[in-house]
C-alpha cells in the first residue's frame, strides 16, 4: 500500500478526503491524546451515511474493533477496521460537540465545534449535509457504568498510534480533530493536538 494523500489537521480543525472502494484511511493521533470525529457519506448520495445505531445493532456491540465493518443508515458496510495500534477505545454513542454543548459547559462567546466543522468541511467538498449524523468518535474514551450511566473520560491513545479502515464503497470522509478544551474529551490538560489523515491504495 502506498500513501496517496496525507493531511495534517490542527487540533480543533477539520478536513475532508474522497476515497474509493478498496482504499484505506489511517487516522493517527500525532502528538498524543486527541479525539477525531469521523463521518462517512456515500460519494454519490449524501443521504446515505455512516450510522452509529445501524452499526451497533448490526454488530451487537457498542463500538467496532479490528475485523468489524461500520454500516450505513441503509445497513450496508461502508468501512472495515483493518488495524488499530491504539488501545481500541473508540466511541459510537456520543453526539458531536456543537455550539450549545459549549454554552451548557459555561463557555461564553464563539467556540469551534465538531458539528460546525462537519458543515464547513461539507461546504469545502461541494457536498450537502442533509442532517448531522452521529460521528464515529475515534480515540474517544466513554465509560459505561453498571448503573447504565456514561461518562467521557481522558483518551488512552498515545502519540503515533492509529486506526486504519478500508473503504467498502466510494466515500466522502470528514474528520474533525475535536476542539473540546473544557471537558476531559481530549485529556485533562485542556489542550487539543493534531491528527494525521492518510489515504493508502495498492
Ligand atoms: Zn467535538
Image (cartoon, helix red, strand yellow):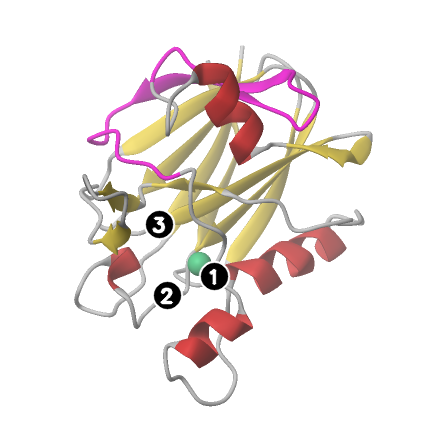
Q: Quadrant of ligand 1?
A: bottom left
Q: Secondary structure at mark 1?
A: loop
In the image, 189 versus 63, the foreground residue is 63
Of residue 195 and residue 56, the one placed in the foreground of this image is 56
Per the image, the residue denoted by label 3 is 35
Mark 3: C-beta under 8 Å from nearest atom of ligand 1? yes
Residue 24, position as x, y percentages in the image:
51, 21
In the drawing, what numbered circle is on residue 180?
2
Q: Quadrant of residue 42?
A: top right
Q: Camera-side residue: 61 or 28?
A: 61
N-terminal of the two: label 1 or label 2? 1
* Magenta-colored span: 66-91
Q: Please report contact status of discs 1 and 2: CB closer than 8 Å, yes or no.
A: yes
Does the beta carbon at disc 2 come under 8 Å from ligand 1?
A: yes
Measured Cα–Cα span from mark 3 to mark 1: 11 Å
Q: Which residue is mark 1?
A: 97
**Inter-mark Cα distance, 3 to 2:** 9 Å
Q: Of the residues tagged 3 and 1, which is closer to the observer? A: 1
Under 8 Å from ligand 1: the CB of mark 1? yes
Residue 79 within the segment the image draws in magenta: yes
* Secondary structure found at label 2: loop
Question: Observer-nearest residue: 13 or 129?
Answer: 129
**SS at badge 3:** loop
Which quadrant is the C terminus positioned in?
top right
Residue 14 horizontal/vertical position (percent): 53, 55
Task: Assess whether mark 2 and mark 3 are in contact (beta carbons under 8 angstroms).
Answer: yes
Q: Position of residue 115 (x, y in %)?
A: 57, 59
* Residue at x-position 65% and y-position 51%: 132
- What residue is rendered at 57% in x and 50% in y? 15
Amino acid at each position: 500500500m502506498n500513501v496517496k494523500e496525507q493531511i495534517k489537521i490542527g487540533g480543533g480543525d477539520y478536513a475532508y478526503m474522497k476515497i474509493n472502494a478498496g482504499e484505506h484511511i489511517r487516522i493517527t493521533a500525532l502528538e498524543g491524546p486527541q479525539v477525531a470525529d469521523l463521518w462517512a457519506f456515500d460519494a454519490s448520495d449524501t443521504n446515505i451515511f455512516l450510522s452509529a445505531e445501524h452499526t451497533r445493532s448490526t454488530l451487537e456491540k457498542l463500538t467496532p474493533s479490528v475485523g468489524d465493518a461500520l454500516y450505513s443508515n441503509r445497513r450496508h458496510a461502508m468501512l472495515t477496521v483493518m488495524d488499530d495500534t491504539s488501545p481500541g477505545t473508540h466511541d459510537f454513542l456520543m453526539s458531536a460537540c456543537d455550539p450549545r454543548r459549549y454554552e451548557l459547559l459555561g463557555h461564553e462567546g464563539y467556540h469551534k465545534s465538531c458539528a460546525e466543522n462537519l458543515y464547513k468541511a461539507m461546504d469545502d467538498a461541494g457536498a450537502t449535509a442533509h442532517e448531522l449524523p452521529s460521528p464515529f468518535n475515534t480515540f474517544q474514551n466513554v465509560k459505561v457504568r453498571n448503573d447504565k450511566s456514561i461518562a467521557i473520560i481522558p483518551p488512552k491513545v498515545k502519540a503515533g498510534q492509529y486506526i486504519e479502515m478500508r473503504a467498502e464503497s466510494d466515500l466522502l470522509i470528514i474528520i474533525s480533530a475535536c476542539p473540546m478544551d473544557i471537558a476531559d474529551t481530549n485529556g485533562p490538560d485542556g489542550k487539543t493536538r493534531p491528527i494525521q489523515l492518510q489515504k493508502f491504495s495498492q
